[in-house]
C-alpha cells in the first residue's frame, strides 16, 4: 500500500509541475483524442427474411389444406343428403 501512495504522490507532483507552454510565434498544433461516440440506434428485424418466407409458405400450405378439407366436407355432406333423399 505504501508504494501506491508514493506513486500517487509522485504522479500528483508531476501533474502539478506540467505547465502549458504556448509559443509566441509559429503555429500551435493540438491533437484530437478519440472519444466514444454514440450513434443513432438502428432497428434490426426480429425475423430474418428466410424465416419470414418459410412462415409465409407454411401459412399458404395450411390455407390450401383448409380449403381442400372444406371442399371434401361439402362434398360428403352433399352426398349424404342425396343418399337420404333416395
Image: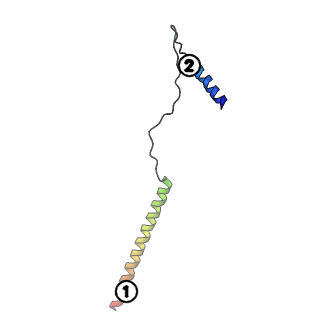
Q: Position of residue 26 (x, y in %)?
A: 52, 9
Q: Which numbered dot is residue 80? A: 1
Q: Position of residue 2 (x, y in %)?
A: 66, 29
Scheme of colours in the image: rainbow
The residue under the point 35% across, 83% down is 78
Q: CA distance from mark 1 to mark 2?
A: 103 Å
The residue under the point 39% across, 75% down is 70
Q: Which quadrant holds the N terminus? A: top right
Q: Position of residue 67 (x, y in %)?
A: 40, 71
Q: Quadrant of residue 69?
A: bottom left
Farthest residue toward the bottom? 86
Decide: is 40 above or below 72: above
Task: Sort mark 2 into few (<14), some (14-19) or many (20+) by Cα contacts within 10 Å.
Answer: few
Image-based side of 51 in relation to 14, left or right = left
Farthest residue toward the top? 25
The residue at which mark 2 appears reads as 16
The residue under the point 51% across, 33% down is 36
Farthest residue toward the front? 2
Q: Quadrant of residue 74?
A: bottom left
Decide: is 61 above or below 44: below
Q: Which numbered dot is residue 54? A: none
The residue under the point 53% across, 29% down is 34
State the SS at label 1. helix
Task: Sort mark 1 into few (<14), some (14-19) or many (20+) by Cα contacts within 10 Å.
Answer: few
State the SS at label 2. helix
Q: Earlier in the sequence, mark 1 or mark 2?
A: 2
Number of numbered discs overlaid on the protein picture: 2
Farthest residue toward the left? 85
**65 or 38, which is in the foreground?**
38
Amino acid at each position: 500500500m505504501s508504494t501506491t501512495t508514493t506513486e500517487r504522490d509522485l504522479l500528483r507532483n508531476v501533474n502539478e509541475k506540467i505547465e502549458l507552454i504556448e509559443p509566441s510565434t509559429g503555429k500551435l498544433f493540438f491533437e484530437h483524442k478519440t472519444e466514444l461516440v454514440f450513434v443513432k440506434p438502428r432497428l434490426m428485424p426480429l425475423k430474418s427474411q428466410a424465416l419470414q418466407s418459410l412462415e409465409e409458405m407454411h401459412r399458404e400450405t395450411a390455407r390450401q389444406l383448409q380449403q381442400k378439407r372444406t371442399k371434401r366436407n361439402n362434398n360428403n355432406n352433399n352426398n349424404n343428403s342425396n343418399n337420404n333423399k333416395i
